[in-house]
Image (cartoon, rainbow, N blue to C red):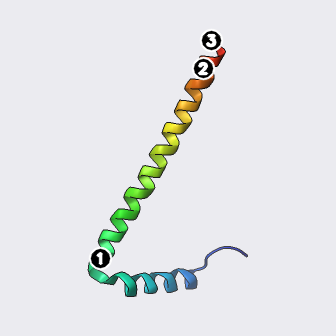
Amino acid sequence: MGGIGIGELVIILVIVLLVFGPNKLGDVGSAIGRGISGFKKAMEDKDSSEDQKKDDKEE
């Protein structure tokens, strides 16, 4: 329950392929990858800044 199965993934991929076309699919994948890596980096920066604030308060 609540998970995405193989059938749903295939349907999503077909819809994405129809919307963007095979030529743009690589560009879309690259953009999604850059977005995810940027999000992860922002989360790591936030965590490190929160840790630094805790250290500053303890001193």
Q: Residue 5's spot in the image, x, y percent?
A: 60, 79
Q: Residue 44's spot in the image, x, y percent?
A: 50, 40
In this picture, residue 19 sits left or right of residue 54: left
What residue is shown at x 58% (from left), y 31% (from top)?
50
What residue is shown at x 61% (from left), y 76% (from top)?
4
Tag 1 secondary structure: helix
Which circle's residue, 1 or 3, is located before the other in the chain? Answer: 1
Q: Quadrant of the N terminus?
A: bottom right
Q: CA distance from mark 2 to mark 3?
A: 6 Å
Amino acid type, residue under disc 2 in the picture: Asp
Res 32 quadrant in image: bottom left
* Disc 2 crowd, CA 10 A, few/some/many (<14, 14-19, 20+): few
Q: Which residue is mark 2?
A: 55
In this picture, residue 59 sits left or right of residue 27: right
Q: CA distance from mark 2 to mark 1?
A: 47 Å
| Disc assigned to residue 6 | none
Q: Residue 26's spot in the image, x, y percent?
A: 30, 72
Q: How many marks?
A: 3
Q: Which residue is mark 1?
A: 24
| Disc assigned to residue 59 | 3
Question: Quick check: 4 above or below 36?
Answer: below
* Disc 1 crowd, CA 10 A, few/some/many (<14, 14-19, 20+): few
Tag 2 secondary structure: helix
Disc 2 vs disc 3: Cβ atoms closer than 8 Å? yes
Q: Residue at the left extreme?
A: 23
What residue is shown at x 64% (from left), y 18% (from top)?
57
Which circle's residue, 2 or 1, is located before the other in the chain? Answer: 1
Amino acid type, residue under disc 3 in the picture: Glu
Question: Quick check: 44 above or below 11?
Answer: above
